Amino acid sequence: MIVRIMGEGQVKLDDAHFTELNKLDDELLAEMESGDETGFRRTLGALLEAVRRMGTPLPDDALEPSELILPAPDATLGEVREMLGDDGLIPG
């Protein structure tokens, strides 16, 4: 799957990693619902770092369609709330 982190670029991520990412996504969703800004910041950073660590960066000139778009590291709680689907940021 091709994942874009807004403002950073794209990475190719194996589907096997989505179990771990979904755990972070669930935690992020709970923190957003409770208004826990500190927890939100920490978990968003952990989610993006996990994608960077587990994924393979695509070249900057690659124009692959992104199947998943994640917010920038400095995104606000409100901005991320607007990006949410029924399952959070990551489907499944």
Image: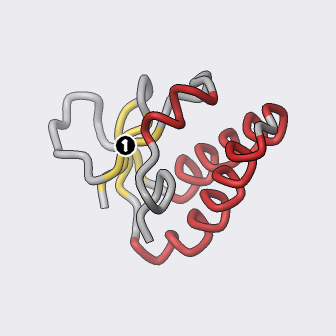
Residue at 62% across, 70% down: 20
Element under label 1?
Answer: strand
Residue at 25% across, 46% down: 66
Q: Quadrant of the N terminus?
A: bottom left
Is residue 88 rendered to the left or right of residue 32?
left
Q: In x, y percent, where is residue 82? A: 45, 34
Q: In x, y percent, where is residue 86? A: 43, 59
The front one of 53 and 25 is 25
Q: Name which quarter of the figure residue 37 lies in.
A: top right
Residue assigned mark 1: 69
- Mark 1 surroundings within 10 Å by alpha-carbon count, few (fewer than 14), some (14 through 19), many (20 or more): some
Amino acid beneath label 1: Ile
67 over 36 or under it: above or below: below
Q: In x, y percent, where is residue 67? A: 26, 53
Residue placed furthest toward the front: 34
Q: Name which quarter of the figure residue 42 lies in.
A: top right
Is residue 72 rendered to the left or right of residue 58?
right
